[in-house]
């Protein structure tokens, strides 16, 4: 059986690359700087997944929207570096969810800078103003928070298994 195919999408290509390489290697991995998309093989409880992760070429980010429907799932990584980037991420998520040609499951991943407080996904969804999107599309859209650092990895494996 061929592996499932998912695509990572979001505003912060560095975070997506770091996340993808960390999942691939099972430990924190600083990715190489790449302007083009990469394909990584991920394994979740024996289930193989081929993930396409965009590189740093920003113009490709917009072209990517045209091919989202060609994948079995979308992993949207919210850019939490500023309030503006959170708002832009929310707008993109709304556009994807409301696009009639895109019906695949969408996993929204939100990075926590400090996972020591361990807020619930509901708290994170409220903070990023995504609660309504998730509630209206609960069969198709899920949100998980994760921590990605060189000392502790939290949450992203559970989210990937959900997808």
Image: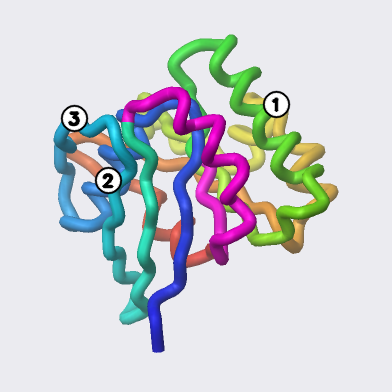
Specify the quadrant of the image occupied by residue 73: bottom right
Is residue 59 depicted above or below 134 in this figure?
A: above
Image-quadrant location for residue 17: top left
Residue 153 locus on image (x, y percent): 27, 45
Sequence-earlier tag: 1 or 2: 1
Q: Earlier in the sequence, mark 2 or mark 3?
A: 3
Residue at the spot of label 2 = 153
Determine whether 72 is above or below 47 in the image.
above
- Contact between marks 2 and 3 (CB within 8 A): the answer is no
Residue at disc 3, secondary structure: loop
Outermost residue on the bottom side: it is 1
Q: Is 88 contained in the magenta span?
A: no
Dominant SS type (magenta): helix
x 31%, y 29%: residue: 14
3D distance between C-alphas at marks 1 and 3 = 27 Å
State yes or no: residue 60 in magenta: yes
Inter-mark Cα distance, 2 to 3? 22 Å
Left or right: residue 114 versus residue 134 is: left
| Residue in view at x 50 percent, y 40 percent | 9
List the residue tagged with mark 3: 33
Residue found at x 36% / y 65% = 50
Q: Position of residue 29 (x, y in %)?
A: 15, 42
Badge 3 crowding class, 10 Å Cα cut-off, few under 14, some 14 to 19, many 20 or more, is: few
Q: Which residues are magenta?
A: 56-76
User: What residue does disc 1 label?
Assistant: 91
- From the viewer's perspective, is the residue at label 1 or at label 2 nearer? 1
Foreground: 147 or 47?
A: 47
| Residue 129 drawn above or below residue 45 | above
């Amino acid at each position: 059986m061929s592996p499932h195919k998912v695509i990572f999408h979001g505003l912060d290509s560095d975070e997506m690359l770091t996340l993808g390489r960390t999942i691939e290697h099972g430990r924190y991995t600083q990715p190489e700087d790449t302007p083009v998309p990469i394909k990584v093989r991920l394994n979740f409880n024996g289930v193989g997944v081929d993930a396409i992760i965009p590189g740093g070429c920003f113009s490709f980010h917009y072209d990517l929207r045209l091919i989202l429907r060609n994948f079995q799932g979308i992993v949207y990584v919210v850019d939490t570096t500023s309030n503006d980037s959170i708002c832009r991420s929310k707008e993109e998520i709304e556009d994807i969810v409301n696009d009639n040609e895109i019906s695949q499951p969408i996993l929204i991943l939100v990075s926590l800078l400090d996972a020591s407080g361990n807020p619930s996904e509901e708290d994170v969804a409220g903070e990023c103003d995504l609660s309504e999107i998730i509630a209206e599309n609960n069969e198709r859209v899920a949100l998980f928070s994760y921590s990605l650092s060189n000392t502790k990895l939290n949450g992203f494996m559970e989210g990937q298994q959900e997808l």
